Image (tube, grey):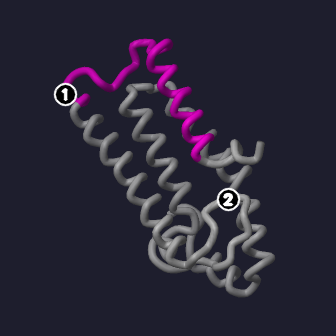
Amino acid sequence: MKWIDVPPVWLFSFAVLAWCQAQFLPLGLGFSTGPIGAIIDLLSGLLIGAGIVLMLLAVAEMRRQKTTLHPHGDPSQLVQSGIFKRSRNPIYLGDCLLLLGLVLRFDAVLSLALLPIFVWVLERRFILPEENRLRRQFRADWARYEQKTRRWL
C-alpha cells in the first residue's frame, strides 16, 4: 500500500476534490465571469505551467545526480544544484502551484481552502520525514544546505 502514499496521489486527490466542489457546490462564487475571467484563466495557466516546469527541473537534476525520486526512498546524493539552490522542495512547490492553478481553472473558489491543507499534508507526510533522513545521512552537508536554502521559496 506504500505505492499509494506518494505526492502525486495526494495531488490528484486534492485536485479531484476541487473539481467536485466546482461541479457540485459552486455557490455562485466563481471567478470566471466578466473581464476578470480572462485574467484568472491566464493566471491559472501560468501557475500550472510554472508548477510543471519546477517539477521537471527538479526531476532532471535528481536524475543527473543519480538519486532517488521516491519520497520514502534513501537518497544516494544530497542534491544542492540546479533548482535545488533556490528551494529544498521544488517538486512539492510545483505540486502546490499546480493545485492552485487547477483550483482557479476549475473556478472552485471554496477549494482555495484546500491549499493550506495540502501544504500541511506534504510537510507532515513527506517533507519532515525526508529532511530527517537527509539530516541523518548527510549531517554537516545537510546542516549547511538547510541554513542557506529555504524549504519552499
Q: What's the amino acid at mark 1?
A: Pro
| Residue 28: in magenta span | yes
Front residue of this view, candidates 35 and 87: 87
Which sits earlier in the primary sequence, circle 1 or circle 2? Answer: 1
Q: Which residues are magenta?
A: 8-37
Task: Identify the residue shown where x is 38% and y is 46%.
Answer: 48
Question: Looking at numbered disc 2 in the image, what kind of residue is underneath it?
Answer: Pro
Which numbered tag is attached to residue 71?
2
Q: In the picture shown, does residue 126 fall above or below 85? A: above
Image location (x, y in percent) of residue 89: 57, 63
Element at label 1? loop
> Quick one: which residue is furthest to the left in this view?
35
Give 35 or 44, whichever is nearer the viewer. Answer: 44
Q: Is residue 8 above or below residue 139?
A: above
The question of residue 38 being in magenta is answered with: no
Pointer 2 local density, CA inside 10 Å: few below 14, some 14–19, many at least 20: some
* Secondary structure of residue under mark 2: loop
Occupied quadrant, residue 73: bottom right
**Left or right of residue 46: residue 15:** right
Q: Which mark is residue 35?
A: 1
Across and down, in percent, residue 32 comes to: 29, 24
Left or right of 151? Residue 33 is: left
